[in-house]
Image: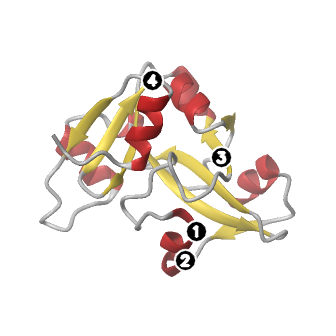
Amino acid sequence: MAVKTNAMRLLDQQSISYELLTYDNRDGKIDGISVAAKIGRPAEIVFKTLVATGTSKNIYVFIIPVQAELDLKKAAQAAGEKKVEMLPVKDIQKYTGYVRGGCSPLGMKKHYLTFIDDSAEQLEKMVVSAGKIGLQIEVVPAELLKAAQAEYAELKK
């Protein structure tokens, strides 16, 4: 069994069931589309976790399908900000405790306002990072919403 990540511990504490999916990342292909292929799931149900900062300097978490692009205007609207911009990669670990490519929406250093793209609402299951490169969690969207204290919003371009 793989080492439990903060994300898995959080789900366990809330008695939320999930399936742990692992993939080989030695080829360096850790982008969402490659990961979806490696874990044998359609890209439409595999989501990436993006961290952004608003005009107010608040940090926000946006969870969108891997093949989609975050619409910064829609993200700002969801967060109630004038504008949001992506957090520089070098700052991701400082704020979340996770590295790029292994950033889970669950179990970050502190809780940030979190939004899940509303396309997830139609899905039976969705996949997000378990908080470590090579590990993914498949979970029911409503359960992730609860665990991440998130809300649905229209986020993608």
Q: Where residue 32 is drawn, which disc sits there?
A: none
Q: Amino acid at mark 4?
A: Ile
Q: CA distance from mark 2 to mark 4?
A: 30 Å
Q: CA distance from mark 4 to mark 3?
A: 18 Å
Q: Which residue is mark 1?
A: 95
Q: Which residue is mark 3?
A: 114
- Residue 13's place in the image compared with 85, above or below, is above
Q: Amino acid at mark 2?
A: Asp
Q: CA distance from mark 4 to mark 1?
A: 25 Å
Please identify the residue farthest to the bottom as the structure is shown: 90
Q: Where residue 16 is drawn, which disc sits there?
A: 4
Q: Amino acid at mark 3?
A: Thr
Q: Of circles 2 and 1, which is in front?
A: 1
- The residue drawn where x is 28% and y is 58% is 133
Residue 88 is situated, as x and y percent measured from the top left of the image, at 56, 78
* Observer-nearest of 100 and 68: 100
